[in-house]
């Protein structure tokens, strides 16, 4: 049974869906580079653009995964959908640029861009190392709570009887990694869970760009350590 509805719970995604999408993108991009068919890059870029703009129902790889593959093999771990979304945006831009470069008379540039997308997409599909996702997480650290940005949690957002040290987790009820952190920290002291779906005001207030975001916080609200991401 599904924990998350793939068409409605779009703030999370089955972690295997992006890998399937990356496999398709990688194969199409590689075929375009080997065969010299820039139209393949353009069509793949268009498909990614439609999915990003109009939702998963307009993404052929998403529809294939959620209607054919997931029902057969079951739901995988659920993760924040924003990192793979950035990866798709990057793929759209690079594939579109590859096709445009080819048609403007720079086939070498187009081939290099197409081959780069193919290499990174197939790497993600095979190893689960997603370059676009890692870039998103890095920028999330820079944009979110960190010693250089928000170095405190407002005590008003903490329990009145907060101990000298506690853990604050910005979480989502369908996030598998969030649940793993909750199990890990349940025996290590006080744990305050802030559901970003129920408290979007706090997510905006502290610049939470990815879940789970887990912090070690002093009783007065000072951020002592960032544990995740």
Image (cartoon, helix red, strand yellow):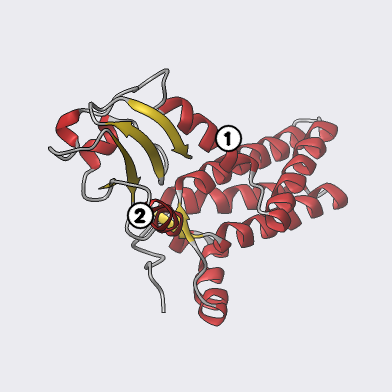
The correct choice, above or below, for 99 with respect to 223 in the image is below
Residue at the far top: name it.
148
Pick the front one: 12 or 220? 220
Q: Does any portion of residue 208 appear in the rendered image?
A: no
At x 71% / y 54%, what residue is drawn?
Answer: 127
Q: Which mark is residue 135?
A: 1
Disc 2 crowd rating (10 Å Cα; few below 14, some 14-19, many 20+) is: few
Q: Earlier in the sequence, mark 2 or mark 1?
A: 1
Left or right placement of residue 197 versus residue 51 in this view: left
Which quadrant of the view contains residue 3?
A: bottom left
Instruction: Indicate whether 146 appears above or below 175.
Output: above
Residue 116: which quarter of the image?
Answer: top right
**Apparent side of residue 126 relative to residue 56 in the rendered image (left or right):** right
Percent x, y for residue 46? 58, 49
Please give the residue where the numbered disc 2 appears in the rendered image.
186
Residue at the (63%, 46%) spot, across then down = 130
Q: Position of residue 41 (x, y in %)?
A: 70, 48
Task: Using residue 107 as the reference point, say whether residue 221 is left or right of it.
Answer: left
Considering the numbered disc 2 on the image, is that residue within a helix, a strand or a loop?
A: loop
Furthest toward the bottom, the residue is 72
| Label 1: element kind | helix
State the residue at coordinates (44%, 48%): 53
Residue at image coords 66%, 53%: 128
Q: Quadrant of the N terminus?
A: bottom left
User: What's the mark number on residue 74?
Assistant: none
| Mark pair 2, 1: CA separation | 30 Å
């Amino acid at each position: 049974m599904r924990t998350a509805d793939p068409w409605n719970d779009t703030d999370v995604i089955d972690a295997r869906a992006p890998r399937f999408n990356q496999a398709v993108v990688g194969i199409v991009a590689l075929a375009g580079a080997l065969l010299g068919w820039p139209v393949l890059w353009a069509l793949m870029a268009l498909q990614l653009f439609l999915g990003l703009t109009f939702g998963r129902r307009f993404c052929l790889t998403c529809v294939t995964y959620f209607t054919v593959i997931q029902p057969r093999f079951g739901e995988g771990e659920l993760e924040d959908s924003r990192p793979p979304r950035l990866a798709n945006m990057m793929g759209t831009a690079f594939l579109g640029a590859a096709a445009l470069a080819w048609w403007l008379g720079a086939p070498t540039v187009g081939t290099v861009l197409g081959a780069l997308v193919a290499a990174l997409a197939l790497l993600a599909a095979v190893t689960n190392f997603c370059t676009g996702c890692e870039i998103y997480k890095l920028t999330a650290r820079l944009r979110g709570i960190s010693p250089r940005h928000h170095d405190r949690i407002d005590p008003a957002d903490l329990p009145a009887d907060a101990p000298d040290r506690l853990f604050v987790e910005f979480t989502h009820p369908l996030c598998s990694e969030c649940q793993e952190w909750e199990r890990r920290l349940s025996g290590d002291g006080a744990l305050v869970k802030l559901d970003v779906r129920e408290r979007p005001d706090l997510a905006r207030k502290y610049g939470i760009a990815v879940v789970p975001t887990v912090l070690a916080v002093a009783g007065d609200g000072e951020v002592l350590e960032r544990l995740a991401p």
